Amino acid sequence: MSGLMEDEKLRVQQLRALRRRWLRDQELSPREPVLPPRRLGPVAAFWERFLQPGRPWRQQVHKFYQTGSFVMLRVLLPAWAVTYFLKYHI
């Protein structure tokens, strides 16, 4: 006796069909995943609106950050280093 019996062949064929169907069912459609709408608290809602691209406040904060980092790196830290050197090494 070599090979599978007829009922075993049928069973293997059915299992393969079921596996193929299961794999096809695992693919997400363009509409998935369906997530519930986000409910934000008052603080999170404020930051969500505040941080949207193109908002004037966001641009002002960015400018303030750039100016502050420039002043810190180009003025305050070198001034502190020079003051420290002059005070303790000369």
Image (cartoon, rainbow, N blue to C red):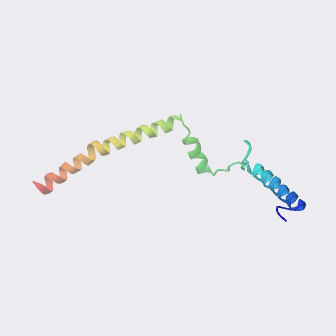
Residue lying at the far bottom in this picture: please name it.
1
Residue lying at the far left in this picture: please name it.
90
- Give the position of the C terminus as an image quadrant: bottom left
Counting from the top left corner in percent of width and height, residue 34 is at 73, 48
Q: Residue at x 42, y 37 (%)?
A: 63
Residue lying at the far front in this picture: please name it.
1
Nearer to me, 43 or 77: 77
59 shown above or below 11: above
Counting from the top left corner in percent of width and height, residue 57 is at 50, 38
Residue lying at the far right in this picture: please name it.
7
- Give the position of the N terminus as an image quadrant: bottom right
Nearer to me, 59 or 11: 11
84 on left or right of 36? left
Counting from the top left corner in percent of width and height, residue 4 is at 84, 61
Nearer to me, 56 or 85: 85
The mark total stands at 0
Q: Residue at x 35, y 43 (%)?
A: 69
Counting from the top left corner in percent of width and height, residue 84 is at 18, 54
Nearer to me, 69 or 4: 4
6 on left or right of 25? right
Q: Residue at x 21, y 50 (%)?
A: 81
- Residue 8 quadrant: bottom right
